[in-house]
Amino acid sequence: MGTLIDRERVRVERTSRSPSETRRLGERIGARLLSGDVLALSGDLGAGKTQLARGICRGAGVPDDEIASPTFAIVATYRGRIPVNHADLYRIGDEDELQATGFPDLVGRVGASVVEWADRFPGALPAERLEIQLAHDPVHPRSRRLVVTGIGARHAALARLLEPRRPV
Ligand SMILES: Nc1ncnc2c1ncn2[C@@H]1O[C@H](COP(=O)(O)OP(=O)(O)O)[C@@H](O)[C@H]1O
Ligand SMILES: [Mg+2]
């Protein structure tokens, strides 16, 4: 029996028209990132999760040359203003494999976490998180739709950073 908690939720939709715009949106969040924050990225291959993650890391003060593709490493921890754990769950087969990476022990606790393919293991993440779903635009090859949902007061505040009245 879980306790029902009425968490604040903020939903923001945005369109990005280029990889650099996606990175700049990420930078805006990264600049305010705090230890304990959890960013859950989802979307098809090529939707722009890694572009967004790069911007987030840059905004958090991670040197560009530290940011590698974590597809093979599963989890990489970068040293920015705060530690940033960049995880990619694409290749994780099951919960046991996920546990073996040590990531479930870090997320929401040590540093901030940016998780690609977060929707593959939604139960592994804290309920309070910033969900960012990215989708290709069927008409414009360089456009992406971003649906951003902040759950809980802290992540709701992060979602508000992306309100469209704040252009990038
Ligand atoms: N608006 C956009 N935002 C992000 N990436 C874009 C955009 N338009 C084109 N792209 C391209 O799409 C690809 C996104 O790749 P990546 O970020 O690795 O996706 P994912 O991590 O979701 O698989 C890159 O080649 C990038 O140049
Ligand atoms: Mg990726």
Image (cartoon, rainbow, N blue to C red):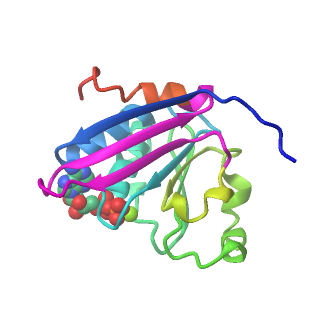
**Residue 136 at what x, y percent from top left?**
25, 57
Residue 69 falls left or right of residue 75: left
Residue placed furthest toward the right = 1
**Residue 6 at what x, y percent from top left?**
70, 29
- Please say if 91 is above or below 19: below
Task: State the image quarter where residue 14 is shown.
Answer: top left
Residue placed furthest toward the left = 140
Q: Quadrant of the C terminus?
A: top left
**Foreground of the two, 95 or 13:** 13
**Foreground of the two, 50 or 137:** 137
Task: State the image quarter where residue 55 is shown.
Answer: top left
**Residue 127 at what x, y percent from top left?**
67, 44
Is there any visible trace of residue 87 in the rendered image? no
Residue at left 29%, top 64%?
Answer: 46
Region rendered in magenta: 126-155
Is there any visible trace of residue 147 in the rendered image? yes
Task: State the image quarter where residue 139 is shown.
Answer: bottom left
- Answer whether residue 139 is magenta in the image: yes
Residue 96 falls left or right of residue 84: right
Q: Quadrant of ligand 1?
A: bottom left
**Residue 115 at what x, y percent from top left?**
52, 55
- Answer whether residue 23 is magenta in the image: no
**Foreground of the two, 120 or 108:** 120
- Please say if 18 is above or below 76: above
Residue at left 83%, top 44%?
Answer: 2
Residue at left 28%, top 46%?
Answer: 145
Residue placed furthest toward the top = 165
Residue at left 41%, top 43%?
Answer: 56
